[in-house]
Structure formats: structure tokens, C-alpha cells
Image (spheres, grey):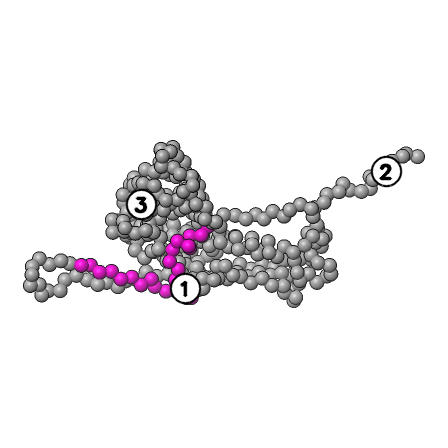
Amino acid sequence: MASGLNVSALADFNNQIAGELMLKLVYGGSTIEYVTVQEGVKYLEPINLFEVELYMNNGTCVSTPSGSATFTQRNIQVCPRTSFDALCLKDLDTKYLGISSLERGSYNETWALTNAYSELLVNQFQKANDQFLWQQESGSYSTYGGTCAVSGLKYIISGSTSGVVVPSGATGSFTATTALSVMDAMIEGLSSDVANRDDLTFFMSVANFRAYVAALRAANSFYFDPSSIENRGNVLEMAYPFQPGIKVVGTVGLQGTNRVVLGPAKQIVVGTDLLSDFSEFQLWYDVNTDTLRHRISTKLGVNIAFPEFWVSNDLA
């Protein structure tokens, strides 16, 4: 008779509940913290604009009125957006997740991973919002906005919008070699009427933000201060060192594009029904279907106040 232990009938042990659960958190984006928010928009509301054209007459006894005071509007249309899912936690019973995350008993009303699930939902929602604000194309389907008659900032701040400036020196490729010349051409094309504003902002993708930083480093290390780059949770930000009052922001909203725009950020108006809808959602156990459910429901749209104060490189 053979000696020793006979364990051939047993599978090799794999302690699946011992490892840490890693969350796939992504770069969320947060354009909304730079802009103006208009709440209470159920479907369509105007951005009310007011401007005065002053006319100076030559003479001392002037009796003829000259000039104008003009009220105009640019509309914000919001798109209703909903995320809904139902998780049958009983599907975990046959997996290691059933042992590690569910209480004993057949009624699975509590789940140890609820907080992690909520964190991932909020994270993905934030990313989808930023991509919607920039890349939603009116009438076209997108994974972050569905199909609706709302255009994102990429399509609004472009040569197709009357007033938006597209300098010829800014329409070439945006790389670590060309970034500074492209941005200088855009600053040159910016209206002098907004030169004193403190919210002038370059918006670009995170990839192009990195190219911009590489361009600074290559041009002259005197201008490059790594500590001046702020990772503000969901956006990368840096002051443009050659022009006071101009910020450079890398946002996930422009992910996958080479579009770069420049203008007064506070003149971007984001319309929504209620601002807290961006941070709150419903998560509940439904006894009728024996599932854990979530629902995120918002309305979102965007426009700019004065197109003539914006510059675009118009790249795809």
C-alpha cells in the first residue's frame, strides 16, 4: 500500500476571497466647475444677453440719440438622460463573491460591495457627463448621451457657429512640437474685448494637455514648473506661463479628439433641472424582483453666450 497523502480528488486551493477588490475608477472630468450653471431647465430656456453699443458724436450741443441697447437670446435645450440597472445578487451564490459579500440567508437585501458599486456609478456618471457636454452630436447616438437634439461644445465652439474665430495658424496638428505655436495663434485670434477677463481658458483633451507640457519642457525649462500642474481630482490644470490670466485645462470631455478651444469659461452655460442630480442617485432593493436596482436621472444641455469671444482650432 502506497504511503503518504492522497489528495488527487481535490482541486488546487485558490483563496479567492483573500485578495483586495480593485475598483476600475476612471478619470471623470469636471468641466462644470469652470462654467455657469443654469438650473430649473425642464426642456428649453434662453440665455438672456444684453449689450450696448456706445456711439460718440462730434460736437457739444448734441440732440440726436445715437447708439443701441440690444437684448438677444441663445437657447439651451436639455436632454433627459437615465441610467437604470438591476442586479440579481443570487447570481453570486455559486461564486466566491457570494461568500465574501452576502450575508447568510436567502433574502439578499444587503451587499457588502454596495459602497464600491455606488462609487463606480458616480465615477462613470461624471465621465459620461463631461463627454456629453463636449462631444454629444445633435441627432446622433452616443454611449454617454443616447440620441437627442443637443449639441456639445465641440460642435458649438467651431467654425460652423457664426462669430467663432478659427485662426489659420491654429489648424495644423497639435503635438509636443507644434502645441505652443498653435496656442499662440489662438491667443492672437482672441478678441481684445475679453483680454482682461480672469476666466480665459484653453480646453483640450488630457493627451493634448500632456503634449502641451512636453512642449513647455522642450522649449525652455525656465518656463516649466512641474509643481504648477494641478490634478484637481478630475481635471488637469496649469497656468499658461506666457500670458497672465489664461488657464490650460485637460478634460476627459475631449478624450479622443484634437479639438482645442479658448475663451471665457464663465460664458459657457450648462443647463440642468437640478444641480444635485449630478451627485445623487437612487439605489434600492426591490423585493418584487429580488434585485438591487439603481436609477440615475438628469437633464443636461449646454451653450455659449457670445460666440465672438471664442477661438477654436477646429480639428476633429
For the residue pair 82 and 107, the one nearer the viewer reads as: 107
Is residue 241 covered in magenta? no
- Provide residue 162's location: percent of width, then percent of height: 29, 52
Residue 56, located in which quarter of the rendered image? bottom left
Tag 1 secondary structure: loop
Measuring 42% from the left and 43% from the top, which residue is drawn there? 229
Residue 72, located in which quarter of the rendered image? bottom left
Measuring 63% from the left and 48% from the top, which residue is drawn there? 21
Range drawn in magenta: 29-54
- Provide residue 231's location: percent of width, then percent of height: 45, 46
For the residue pair 177 and 229, the one nearer the viewer reads as: 229
Q: Which residue is mark 2?
A: 5
Measuring 32% from the left and 51% from the top, which residue is drawn there? 198
**Could you tell whether 60 is left or right of 14 in the image?**
left
- Residue 18 makes an appearance in the image: yes
Position of the C terminus, as image quadrant, is top left
Q: Which residue is mark 3?
A: 244
Alpha carbon distance from label 1 to label 2: 72 Å
Is residue 50 covered in magenta? yes
**Could you tell whether 232 is left or right of 155 in the image?**
right
Measuring 70% from the left and 58% from the top, which residue is drawn there? 103
Which amino acid type is marked by label 1? Answer: Glu
Tag 3 secondary structure: loop
- Mark 2 or mark 1, which is nearer the start of the sequence? 2
Which amino acid type is marked by label 3? Answer: Pro
Q: Which residue is mark 1?
A: 39
Alpha carbon distance from label 3 to label 2: 77 Å
The number of numbered badges drawn on the structure is: 3
Tag 2 secondary structure: loop
Position of the N terminus, as image quadrant, is top right
